[in-house]
Amino acid sequence: MLNIHQTLGHVAATQPASTMVFLRHRLDFCCKGGQKLVDACRAAGLEPDAIIAEIEAESGRGTPVRWDEQPLGELIDFIITRYHDSLRADLPALLAAATRVERVHAAKASCPHGLAKELEAFERDLSQHLLKEERALFPAIRSGAGGGVISAPTSVMMQEHEDHGAVLERLRTLTGDYDPPLEACATWRALYAGLATLERELMEHIHLENNVLFPRALNV
């Protein structure tokens, strides 16, 4: 049963519909999933009981998969096909769009100067991160390796997740919270919409690893 003293990560893992509520209110349930719901809400100026009511309402609209109850191999397959493959497909297009927007609209004060450079570095770092998971950590988890074998690699991945969260914050700053200016062209608007989707999906992705996959694998 939900209560305000549970952590964001625990709530997100056991009540999957809660992630939509957390995203709506900008509550970081992935990199800062260790925060208690009550503390995170108060820091954000939100009423904890109201957030719980929203989560319960959201949960009544469907039955999302409880990945904390599925086999680890199935969870890994889902992470790769739903999030890793999407990142590889989406980031190059977003980088190309950012490069185009900065080139065409460079003279405008509202132009997101530096966005393409940030995305280029982000794509490079994420590519290396995904490969490390797919070639080393995930196979070790599939083999049933216990905490002693995967403790160090999971710690490294979680630190890199923190770094990814910091990049998301910088992207929001550069784009004014993904709110395109009135003079924005279609490419500019599509870019910001795509970045908002990227943020949402990356947070869901990190949550599944930090709060579900890694804790379960470490307890094998």
Image: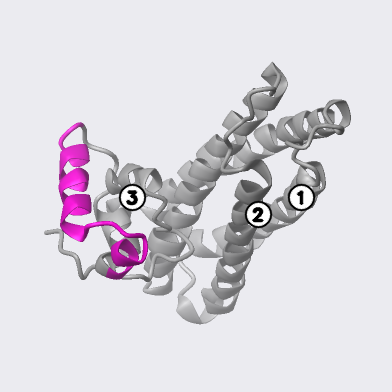
Viewer-nearest residue: 43 or 117: 43
User: Is 42 within the magenta?
Assistant: yes
Name the residue furthest top. 186
Instruction: Measure the C-alpha gap from mark 2 to mark 3.
Output: 30 Å
User: In the figure, is residue 129 to the left or right of 165?
Assistant: right
Q: Position of residue 159 (x, y in %)?
A: 59, 70
Disc on res. 118: 1
Is label 2 in a helix, a strand or a loop? helix
Q: Are marks 2 and 1 in contact (CB under 8 Å)?
A: yes
Q: Quadrant of the N terminus?
A: bottom left
Dot 3 corresponds to which residue? Answer: 67
Q: Position of residue 100 (x, y in %)?
A: 83, 28
Dot 2 corresponds to which residue? Answer: 170
What residue lies at 76% left-to-right and 44% top-to-bottom?
A: 115
Viewer-nearest residue: 134 or 105: 105
Magenta span:
39-61
Do we see residue 139 in this rendering? Answer: no
User: Is 57 within the magenta?
Assistant: yes
Whichever of labels 2 and 1 marks the residue nearer the N terminus, that label is 1
Instruction: Measure the C-alpha gap from mark 2 to mark 1.
Output: 8 Å
What residue lies at 75% left-to-right and 45% top-to-bottom?
A: 119
User: In the figure, is residue 209 to the left or right of 168?
Assistant: left
User: In the figure, is residue 35 to the left or right of 92?
Assistant: left
Q: Kindly indicate the quadrant of the structure image that contains residue 166.
A: bottom right
